Amino acid sequence: MNWKLIHQSGETYQADFSLLSKSDLVQLKKSDGWSRGLNWSTYLASNHECTAYKLHITGNPIIQGLIAIAIKDGFVEVDLIEKAPFNRKPRNEFINVGEVLFCLACQTSFDNNGEGYVLLQAKTGLLEHYIDHYGMEVVNSKKRLLAIPTVEANRLIELYLI
């Protein structure tokens, strides 16, 4: 399965997802701008319910973004998601990394009889961004639980799956 990443110049690149591995962790230096307090190595434990994936340009090992998901009964839960520092404001090298990361969760949901339904708990301050930018719906405002409904999942996949 290949995905379409859009460079800020408008040029498109073919991208893939791979499982995050221990050897990838050297790319995730806090000093290079990766988020402090996010420990991606915890998802490498064999008994962790989530699986972590890295998004990269086909044939290029540089990580463009990361997502950790768990397959649940009827949906996929996003435990953690992060764009590479150079794909965040103000630089935004690739402008649709967030969308493509969520696409993987949506496609995984479809592949596992979840009808594209994806659930996540938004970090403080990101709730409105997820609603406005990704078309997510509020499931529980007190717990900041959001969902990508089937219609939005289909739209994302149609846009970015090659």
Image: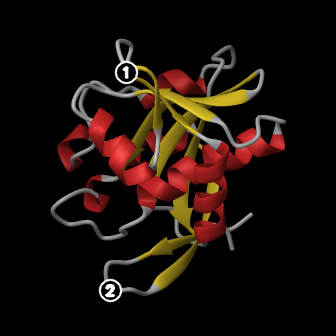
Q: Residue at x 44, y 75 (%)?
A: 6
Q: Which residue is mark 2?
A: 9
Alpha carbon distance from label 1 to label 2? 34 Å
Q: Which amino acid is tagged 2?
A: Ser
Q: Position of residue 10 (x, y in %)?
A: 38, 86
Q: Is residue 64 visible?
A: no
Q: Which residue is mark 1?
A: 144
Q: Secondary structure at mark 1?
A: loop
Closer mark to the observer between disc 1 and disc 2: 1
Q: Residue at x 60, y 41 (%)?
A: 149
Mark seen at residue 115: none
Dividing the picture into quadrants, the one containing residue 4 is bottom right
In which quadrant of the rendered image does the C terminus lie?
Answer: bottom right
Establish if 153 lies above or below 155. above
In which quadrant of the rendered image does the N terminus lie?
Answer: bottom right
Q: Is residue 19 visible?
A: yes
Q: Indicate the colouring scheme.
A: secondary structure
Please state if 116 lies on the left or on the right of 25 as rendered. right
